[in-house]
Each structure stands twice: as structure tokens, then as C-alpha cells.
């Protein structure tokens, strides 16, 4: 069996909350169950969105939940050269182009209509870089390990931005370049990223690399029916031992893993070891986990 390498790749826009814990725990268990490696990558490509100290807080939170990663933590803010090289390669292949258009100009179109594909309209102003979704692999499909068979035409989703006008790298390019560079074989992440996968598959194809397997997890929904997120004031993870143990137990339960009720207050290492042995991704629900079941609700 080829070596399994999973990862957790949070954006450090704030501390982890119960929604991000689901992705951390599931990706950890999935890799460890297969005797694989599990890496931690901090996706800090957008510094204005990442308050100082948030990445360190995430590291401490993961440690408190017993989620120990392998090797050094990778920081995307230190990876400009790799993204630059990938963009140069895509540009050479005619798969990336400079775009001067502003969202305001094309807002009536739903997706960017590709005006700069045949030549940048205003090469004299700051430009973004976009992917030629019309020229990449189409359609793309994959067998998602929880959500089942998926098929998309990336061109119907539009020419996604690879590098922003302000010079910051976009998630789509950075995530693929790093997953390739780190040899990630198994991507386990939230369902909110499912419809980003088509562009990422086009990028794998263009860069000549076999894509990883994908497992998109159910999202944790608050009472308002919205995904738990920093925007809707999800509470940071608890930091007392008792609450940590109970939240880990609740997370495993919500992932369909049926931990032994007697382990509800057991140390995290013990809970993780048992869950790792018994890991069954097919026992998971496909769509939504209620935040109430995790005992976490939004803070005031
Ligand atoms: N950084 C992304 C996030 O925090 C996750 C990236 C991924 O797992 O592909 O939403």
C-alpha cells in the first residue's frame, strides 16, 4: 500500500473552534488509522486576515487535544518561491493569465467572463492572475470518500484567481502546490471546500501530478443554520481538561464513531488511540452536524 500522508491546514484567522476541530480530528484519525503521517500546515497567505499569535494558539490547541503532528509545521507565508515557480509553469502552458478586471466590472455575469483571456485589457494597472478553467481538464470527477461520486465542469465555475491583485497568493494555488510538495495522499476537510476541488484537480492535472483522494466532512451548523465559523462568532475551543475531554468525545460521536460511553471523560490520548483503531469514515453522516450535539453554541 502506498504511504498515506494526511494533513490539517487551518487558516490562522483566529483560534480553532468546534467546526475546525472536526476537520483536525477526522484528518488525524484517518491518517493514523492507516499508519500514515499527519502534517500541520498553517495557511497564512493572507496576513491581514491572520492576527498575530493566532497560529501559535492553534498549535497549543491541537496539543491540548492530543493531536500530535509529524515533522515541522509548514507556514505558507514562507513559500512564495514555490508558488511563483508553479505560476510560471502554468503561464508557460497557457493555463494562467493576467487579469486587470475588477469585480465591479463583471458583477452582472455571476462568474468572471474571461475578458482578459486573449490579452490583458489594462496591462498598465495592478493585475490578478487567473486560471484558464476552459482549457484545463474538463469535466473533472472524483469518488469522494464520504460524499460519493462528484462531477463538475470547472469552466462553469469560472476562472479562479491564483494570485490576487494585491500580490497575495490565493488559496487554490497555494493549497495544491503545498499538498504536492508535501506528498499529501489523503485530503480530509470540510464540505465547504468541495466545490473548490474541481479547480484544484485542474491544477494537479496541469502540473502533471496524480491528485490525492478526497474526503469532505459534514459541517457543524449553528442554530441559525449557518456553518460554525469565526464570522458567526463560534467560540474558541475550551481549555480546561474536563471540557477538552468531553468535546473530543462529542466530536467522535458526531463523526459517527460510537466511542465507548465509559471513555467520555478519559484522557485525550486514550480516546484518540481507541478512535484510531476503530476509525470508520463510512459511518459518518454526509451533510450537517448540529452544534448543539457538540455542546457548543455561539458566544454573545
Ligand atoms: N485553509 C483552509 C481553511 O482553513 C483549509 C484548506 C484545505 O483543507 O484544503 O478553510
Image (cartoon, helix red, strand yellow):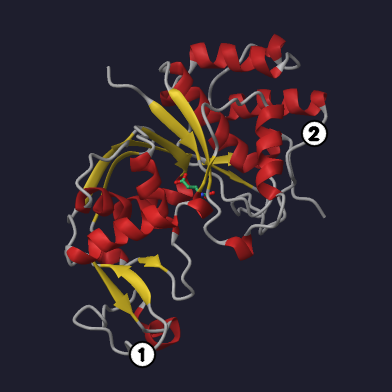
* SS at mark 1 in the image: loop
Give the CA separation, mark 2 to mark 1.
51 Å
Task: Please say if 221 is above or below 259.
Answer: below
Q: What's the residue at 72%, 55% (across, down)?
A: 233
Left or right of residue 24: residue 265? right
The disc label shown at residue 111, or none: none
**Which mark is in front, 2 or 1?**
1
Instruction: Say whether residue 27 is visible.
Output: yes
The disc label shown at residue 239, or none: 2
Image location (x, y in percent) of residue 264: 72, 17
Q: Earlier in the sequence, mark 2 or mark 1?
A: 1
* SS at mark 2 in the image: loop
**Which quarter of the figure has residue 37?**
top left
Instruction: Give the crowd class for mark 1: few <14, some 14-19, many >=20 residues within 10 Å.
Output: few
Quarter of the image with the C terminus in it:
bottom right
From the image, tell me which residue sits under label 1.
124
Instruction: Say whether residue 173 is visible.
Output: no
Image location (x, y in percent) of residue 144: 33, 37
Task: Please say if 126 is above or below 222.
Answer: below
Q: What's the residue at 53%, 25% (across, down)?
A: 256
Amino acid at each position: 500500500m502506498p504511504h498515506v500522508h494526511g494533513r490539517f491546514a487551518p487558516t490562522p484567522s483566529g483560534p480553532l473552534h468546534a467546526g475546525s476541530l472536526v476537520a483536525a480530528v477526522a484528518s488525524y484519525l484517518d491518517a493514523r488509522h492507516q499508519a500514515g503521517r499527519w502534517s500541520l500546515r498553517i495557511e497564512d497567505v493572507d496576513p491581514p486576515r491572520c492576527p498575530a499569535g493566532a497560529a501559535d494558539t492553534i498549535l497549543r490547541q491541537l496539543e491540548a487535544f492530543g493531536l500530535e503532528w509529524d515533522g515541522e509545521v509548514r507556514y505558507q507565508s514562507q513559500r512564495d518561491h514555490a508558488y511563483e515557480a508553479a505560476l510560471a509553469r502554468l503561464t508557460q502552458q497557457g493555463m494562467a493569465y493576467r487579469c486587470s478586471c475588477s469585480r465591479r466590472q463583471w458583477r452582472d455575469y455571476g462568474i468572471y467572463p474571461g475578458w482578459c483571456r486573449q490579452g490583458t485589457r489594462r496591462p498598465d494597472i495592478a493585475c490578478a492572475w487567473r486560471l484558464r478553467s476552459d482549457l484545463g481538464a474538463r469535466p473533472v470527477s472524483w469518488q469522494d470518500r464520504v460524499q460519493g461520486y462528484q462531477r463538475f465542469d470547472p469552466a462553469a465555475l469560472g476562472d479562479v484567481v491564483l494570485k490576487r491583485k494585491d500580490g497575495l497568493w490565493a488559496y487554490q494555488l497555494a493549497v495544491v502546490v503545498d499538498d504536492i510538495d508535501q506528498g499529501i495522499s489523503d485530503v480530509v476537510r470540510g464540505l465547504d471546500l468541495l466545490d473548490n476541488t474541481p479547480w484544484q484537480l485542474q491544477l494537479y492535472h496541469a502540473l502533471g501530478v496524480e491528485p490525492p483522494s478526497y474526503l469532505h466532512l459534514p459541517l457543524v451548523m449553528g442554530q441559525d443554520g449557518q456553518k460554525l465559523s469565526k464570522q458567526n462568532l463560534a467560540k474558541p475551543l475550551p481549555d480546561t481538561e474536563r471540557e477538552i475531554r468531553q468535546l473530543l468525545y462529542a466530536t467522535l460521536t458526531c463523526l459517527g464513531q460510537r466511542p465507548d460511553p465509559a471513555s467520555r471523560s478519559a484522557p485525550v490520548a486514550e480516546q484518540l488511540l481507541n478512535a484510531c483503531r476503530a476509525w470508520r469514515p463510512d459511518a459518518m453522516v454526509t451533510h450537517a452536524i448540529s452544534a448543539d450535539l457538540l455542546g457548543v453554541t455561539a458566544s454573545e
